[in-house]
Image: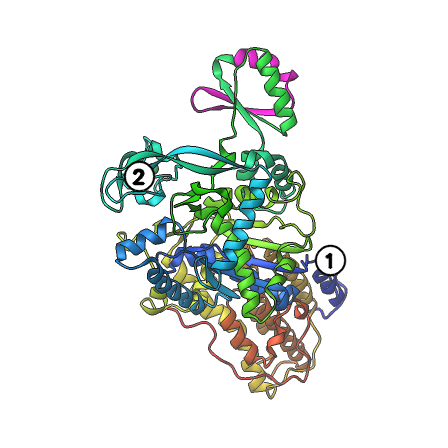
Amino acid sequence: MNQHRPNSENPAGNPNDIEAIKKRAHRPKKAVITAAMTYANGPIHLGHLAGANIPPDVYARYMRMLIGAQNVLFVSGSDDHGSTSELAALKAGKTTREFIDEIHQQQYATLKRYDVSLDVYSGTSRPECFPIHKQMAQDFMRKLNNNGLLNKRISQQWFDPKVGRFLQDRFVQGKCPNLKCDNENAYSNECDKCGTQYTPTELLNPRSAISDATPVLKDTVHWFLDMWKVSETLRVWIQGKEKTWRASVFNEVINTVLPSLAFSNIHETKYKELKTSLPKHKSKYAAGKKIQVQFENKEDLNQGQKLLLDNGIENELLDGWAHRSITRDVTWGIPLPEEWGPEIAGKSLYVWPDSLIAPIAFTQVALKKKGLDPAKYEEFWKEPQAKIFQFLGQDNVYFYVLMQGAFWVGSQKDPSKLPAAGDFQLTDIFGSFHLMVDGEKMSKSKGNYFTGDQLLDEKGYSVDQIRYFVTLLSLPEKMSNFDFENFKERNRFLAGPMNAAFEKPISACHSKFGGVVPKGILLDKVQAETAKIIQRYLRSMERAEYSTLLYAVENYARLVNSLFVQTKPHDDRFPEEERNNGLFSCFYILKNLMIMLYPFVPSTMDRLRQSLNLPESVFTIEELGTPIPAGHTIGQKQEYFPAAD
Ligand SMILES: [Zn+2]
């Protein structure tokens, strides 16, 4: 094997190039990472771990290695308000507070078992959070109202005449209004079987989940958020994310926010005549015998709308997405600002905006917990050089991008501008698709529903086996399947070739080199492969694209085995210089592997760190591509990944 000669195939042929690669990584000054909040109605299950908790944990650990732990806050909490927890408590025969506290403890314990390194796991109703959260949320509501982004409207809501209260979302069940769907237990505003969202009045055969009475519709006042008023600001922001957000996230929101209108297809001929005189647009056939036209901005839309009207084409603005009620007839939630008058009685902030604002309060709770001034949250949320990375389910992208964006921008001094320093900064979104288990949607009746605790206690898997496998699944791109056969196969790989890559150099070092890293030269091929993998690593981690990255890291680990075949450090009948260089290079690979895999399998990599006798401070990006020096005494071999059947 060639030794450290310049290599024309390798764009990064010397250690300095790795330094240059590392320098190119984007380093925000501060970073907040949020894990999707879990409803306080049940235990953490495999779907939560795979979609909501482990991917952001990997990201938070990476960020800490990149910009320093003191600059990173990883926050989450239970989504306590709204009807979900209230209803679950009612069914369990407990008070809402009692029920939530129990669930919360259980959820937090499971997250800790899975090494989810949250700086805080709070909850929207918890005493350490609620007062701060209420203040932040009311502040948003007041500012939105003052900026004219809230409109009072009277609408009809289901009311249970038997118990004398309005019935929210999940308190009413009935037949899904989607004729293609047969769900008899759809909620009042959405069907969790087919995913359709609708207004409560559309639900068929409604019944109360509290009393089983047939509910009646009653007038009620609610405050609606006018996102249309800030849609141009949102559009400009979203268009700037085309290259950084996942395509599934970007496409969904850009297609919502680009201004569109629709007209009957009886005007098709006339429209075709006008087509070239209309501002630049895209058109398509839409449901209800309509033609839908999407413009590039509001000015074009207004021009287009006028031209169509002038030519006798009646059309409707497709702005339904932009007007949503942000209040509900429930008392279990954030109260509305008192000065809004007597109409606020019995109402609170809708649980969606409630949960969008909650991470700001969680951040303050986290700072307090660390003994820092909670007011420092502004350095994390209001500085343009800080970044907020939010991990959430793909089906919540609308809320986290459009509704949250409208809350942030709409509460600024000037809602027509993107946030400046001192304003709440718009966040970066990582959407994740649903996890299926053994080819089907998880459900208790199908026997493919697993809580996080069950996987450890009953199935006997290790935390790192699960962490590794769920990050290998491609949830960022598509619905993915947790297939137990594939899982076992991957565990065999970890217990086999991966463990061997860790163990071989350590064993050879103890048996033939007195437990000391030999004096050697880094082999060219190793140097080149390392530069390549580090570049790949930094790029993929920034985008939270773990799946294909892990396969590349696995290939990098295989280099250890091939170096053993070529240089035979464990066999002293072979030339000493080659053996020295081989083992020295193996330790170099091992150190890089250990750092790169740390965010994914932290406790296994911490055991490897102990075996290499390196300090905890080695887990930084700065240490990537730097060798373990010759003469360093290593520690003892340990058990890394558990044996697999
Ligand atoms: Zn349905």
Looking at the picture, which amino acid does disc 1 mark? Pro
Residue at the (56%, 50%) spot, across then down: 139
* Residue 633 position within the rendered picture, expressed as x and y whole percent measured from the top left: 62, 85
Residue at the (64%, 41%) spot, across then down: 237
What residue is shown with label 2? Answer: 159
**Magenta span contains residue 147:** no
Question: In the depicted view, which residue is nearer to us: 191 or 161?
Answer: 161
- Front position among marks 2 and 1: 2
What residue is shown with label 1? Answer: 11
Residue at the (42%, 22%) spot, across then down: 288
Q: Relative to residue 268, is residue 629 drawn left or right?
A: right
Q: Mark 2: which secondary structure?
A: strand
Residue at the (71%, 75%) spot, across then down: 521
Looking at the picture, which amino acid does disc 2 mark? Phe
Write down the quadrant of residue 1 in the picture.
bottom right
* Residue 176 position within the rendered picture, expressed as x and y whole percent measured from the top left: 31, 36
